[in-house]
Image (spheres, rainbow, N blue to C red):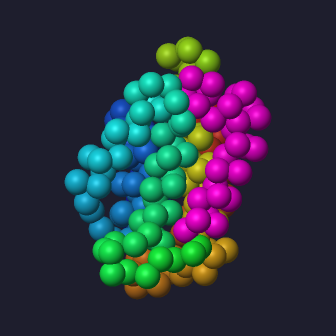
Amino acid sequence: MVNGADRLIQLKERGVCCSQVLLIVGLEDQGKTDRDLVRAVSGLAAGMFSGEICGTLTGGACLLGLYAGRGTPDDAEDHRLRIMVGELVEWFSQEYGRLFGGIRCDDILGGDANACSRCGSIVLGTYEKIRTLLVENGFDLESAEHKKEVPSMKSHQTLLKQLILS
């Protein structure tokens, strides 16, 4: 069975956009697939195709919503969603915004098409942060609902090094 980090790399190597990668892996972590949802988040790619807010960040917010968002108007709102999204935005701004001068795709890529190679490590780091936020906010990623095992931090660090070096 392929763990989430390996799957992230496979999808990025196949040219799948960052927001879609996060949702595909997040759905797979739950033992689900949803082509319509994955198709919908493709609109977040490349900063909504305008170089604006990074699709990894907006896709990450969508992934948190997959866990804590309302599925129907009758569902109760889960207050943890706003907290987790706020923490994700703050973390992303500190982690990548400072490094690249902002959280927009144009900031991160600096107008250099070859800079897309840095997207893989950003997606992986964001995926790790999302999983951490979910656990810290009481989501049991080991429950029957969330069937796949959580990859170890060591495997994430190894994969992150591979992404950075490639």
Tell me the residue at 52%/17% (across/down).
114
Tell me the residue at 43%/82% (across/down).
76
Percent of width and height locating residue 5: 51, 53
Compared with 72, 116 (above or below) is above
In which quadrant will I find the N terminus? bottom left
Percent of width and height locating residue 141: 51, 76
Residue at the top extreme of this rendering: 112
Let me know if residue 10 appears in the view. no
The quadrant holding residue 23 is bottom left
Q: Is residue 127 magenta?
A: no
Q: From the image, give the main secondary structure of the stretch colored magenta.
A: helix
Percent of width and height locating residue 91: 71, 51
Tell me the residue at 34%/39% (across/down).
43
> Which stretch appears magenta?
81-109
Residue at the left extreme of this rendering: 36
Is 101 left, or right, of 1 in this rendering? right
In which quadrant will I find the C terminus? top right
